[in-house]
Image: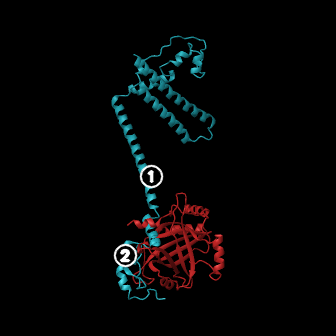
Amino acid sequence: MQREEKQLDAALEALLQRINDLKTSIRTLLFRLENEYASLSWPSFLDSYAVISGQMNTLLKVMKNDKTPLLRNLIVLPLVLSPDPDEELKQATEGRVVAFSHDITPDMLRTKPDPDVEQRQNQFEQRASQVPPETAQKQINALNKVVNHVLEQITHSREDWENEATVRAAAAQTCVTADTHTLIAAVGLGKNLKTLPIAAPAQPGPGRAQAGPAPGKTTSTIKTTIKAASQVHPYNR
Amino acid sequence: MASNQNPISAIDMLTSALRSNIIPNQEYLLQGSVIDSSAEVLHNRLRGLCDAAETGPETFHDHEMCFSLKASSPGGTPQQQQSFLLRVRRALDHPEYPWQLRYLGQPELGEKNQPTVLRSCIDIACTPNVVEFLSELGCRIEFEYVLKGYLFRKGRMKVTMSKIFRMGQAKSPDSLEAMTGSYLVELSLLAPSGQDAVADEIKVFAEQLRPLVHLEKIDYRRLQSYS
């Protein structure tokens, strides 16, 4: 019994928190609507709606939570109704409810929807029950088809747009990093640039040839040193 | 591309210049490359951004040779010999221009907030017999290549778009093969040491060339270790 009470308390706390958050965001939205209606743009309005929808989601999740006792099985019963102002109640509700009296109780504790909402709902239910089941099924199928079609269209367009973005990025590639490295290594270190045969044959061959910048060239330098010995200075100046 | 140093009033001017730290002997550098198909676009963009848009950019067709000189330390084993590179550059399209002898020090990349590569650089104009002179000194030619491209200037900055060609087998200027399908783009500025504010100038300019070409600090000594 105690455990259930504790669970109930915890659940009520969580619900209260969520509802307060929801209340704040609705309030900010209304404020923005009233004061900033000139500068408000549809996307930012939609963002506020998204916030509210998110909060409603979390609220429902809390209610569906396993730890929450079945609220359906519990009822709120007013024990004492008095028309006198109640200070604690005033503080708890931020001044909105002054007294727990007979006229506000039906509004506060109601479980049925508003009368006009209730009427509209009854109308819909009547219309729905009048439709024979086969036509109802056909209508459901048609609706499903249309919605799937629209969904397909949207996914195709999204894929096209994404492809376009990637193609444009790929086509716009104007530099190749490998080339950059090759060029800079060539200019800086002489990588892959063939060395000419050594001009002065008097220099010791193999020892100096080791100091060539790229290891790939050492073999060719060693071979060409032998040839170079008989050659004149390569630059005919 | 030769620097305009007057060789006649050498010693006194040199000494005073060295003392007052006005010799531009530091090069602030950023490098990148652009593929041939987009080179035209980059060329136009540089024409728009740089000075002298009406006369058009200068083209150059140079032949660069790199000589290495081994400085042997007395009493040291042959492995301890340090070598440094000297570059000789001549303009193939203007044979009457002086040749350029250039020393480039080791590039320093610095930390992340240093926007450019910094290396010491000394440029000297010389006559064509510099090759003979260097060989007599004991320099050995390491490698050579031909560059063909465009030179743009903006203030003190120099941007070059060059295509690097390997010297062909026949050693004649006609037998050239391009090394890659890209142009090497270099953005450099020569300044006396200590003027690091120019590096920010370079960085700002480099930003304007994106996304066509990404000019960045590339350590070519590390490139040597790859393959």
Q: How is the model colour-coded?
A: by chain
Near-viewer residue (B65 or A174): B65
**Element carrying mark 2:** helix
Return the residue at label 2: A218
The quadrant of the rendering that contains the C terminus of chain B is bottom left
Near-viewer residue (A215 or A120): A215
Figure colour of chain B: red
- Is residue A232 shown above or below A71? below
Q: Residue furthest left?
A: A134
Q: Residue at x 55, y 38 (%)?
A: A45
Q: Residue at x 61, y 75 (%)?
A: B55
- Is residue A156 shown above or below B46? above
Near-viewer residue (A41 or B179): B179
Mark 1 Cα shell of 10 Å, populated few (<14), some (14-19), many (≥20): few
A137 left or right of B89 in image: left
Badge 2 or badge 1: first in the primary sequence: 1
- Is residue A87 shown above or below A47? above
Figure colour of chain A: cyan
Point out residue B206 in the picture as x, y percentages from the top left corner. Answer: 55, 63
Mark 2 Cα shell of 10 Å, populated few (<14), some (14-19), many (≥20): some
How many discs appear?
2
- Is residue B197 shown above or below A146? below
For residue B172, the mark is none
Q: Amino acid at mark 2?
A: Thr
Q: Chain of mark 2?
A: A
Return the residue at label 1: A161
A124 left or right of B26 in image: left
Point out residue A136 in the picture as x, y percentages from the top left corner. Answer: 36, 31
